[in-house]
Amino acid sequence: APKQKKKTGKHPIVSQDQPFTDAPEVQPGQLRDVNLVPDDLLGESQPARKVRPVAIAGVCAILVVILAYVGLYWYRNIVIGETKEIDEQIQQVRTSIKGFEDFRVEAEDLRRRVDDVAFLLDHHIHWNTFFDLLETHTLADVYYTDMTVGSGGVVALNAVARDTITVARQYALFQNSEDFIQDVSISAVAPYLDPKTSLPAGQIFSVSLTVQPSLFIESSE
């Protein structure tokens, strides 16, 4: 005869020989998920578990953005510093170039002056002959205020004539003085005011004379 369950207290006692018919049957090779946490507590913790990875991902994204901003700001400062340094170097180079250009102009002017002096030292003009010929080929209504001598036998004169007609006649006279002048040009014709009275006193003009080489003596020393 089968054994009967004994009732003791609140919980019934199951006989060891009686099988558990309420438990589902487990097939061979199949694992059962055993969860010892009560269902009421498990239901409250699952949403929290889902929110936590999202929160971590959001914090990580914010950190990445902050680090990227800091990196870009740092790199921007480096670029600005390097750009400023390059601009300063460019300005220094421009200043140096300007100084060199000024020096080059001064050097060219000095070289020209040295060449003129060297020419005058190597080629001596017969000044007596030159002034005699100049006086002979100058009209009575023309006089000279200053004279400079350049290289190649070029003599520059500033002269004053009574009027423009006299200037034209003087130019024609120079052109016909082939024994004395090789080439002549007149420029900068303008009214002349007397320095003492400030009244019109004729026409001032510039003369450029290329003297014949026969007026030069080649230096033998």
Image: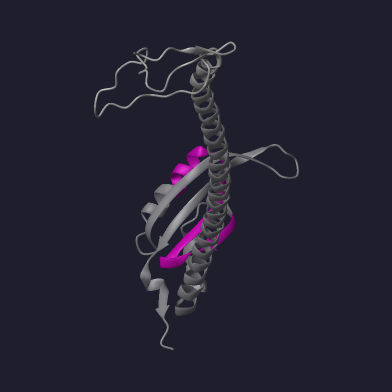
Residue 104 among magenta residues: no
Residue name at image x 51 percent, y 73 percent: 117
Foreground: 175 or 49?
49
Residue 152 among magenta residues: yes
Q: Report the residue that reaches farthest toward the front.
A: 1
Residue 53: x %, y % from top left:
49, 25
The quadrant in which the C terminus is found is: bottom left
Residue 140 visible in the displayed image: no
Instruction: Check the image and report above or below for 193 versus 98.
Output: above
- Left or right, residue 92 beside residue 30: right
Instruction: Check the image and report above or below for 9 versus 196.
Output: above
Residue 202: x %, y % from top left:
60, 40
Residue name at image x 52 percent, y 35 percent: 68
Q: Which residues are magenta?
A: 145-170
Residue 186: x %, y % from top left:
45, 47
Q: Report the residue that reaches farthest toward the right.
A: 196
Colouring: one colour
Give the total of numbered labels: 0
The quadrant in which the N terminus is found is: top left
Residue 12: x %, y % from top left:
51, 12
Foreground: 212 or 151?
151
Q: Report the residue that reaches farthest toward the left.
A: 28
Foreground: 198 or 187?
187
| Quadrant assignment, res 217 | bottom left
Residue 213 visible in the displayed image: yes
Residue name at image x 42 percent, y 50 percent: 185
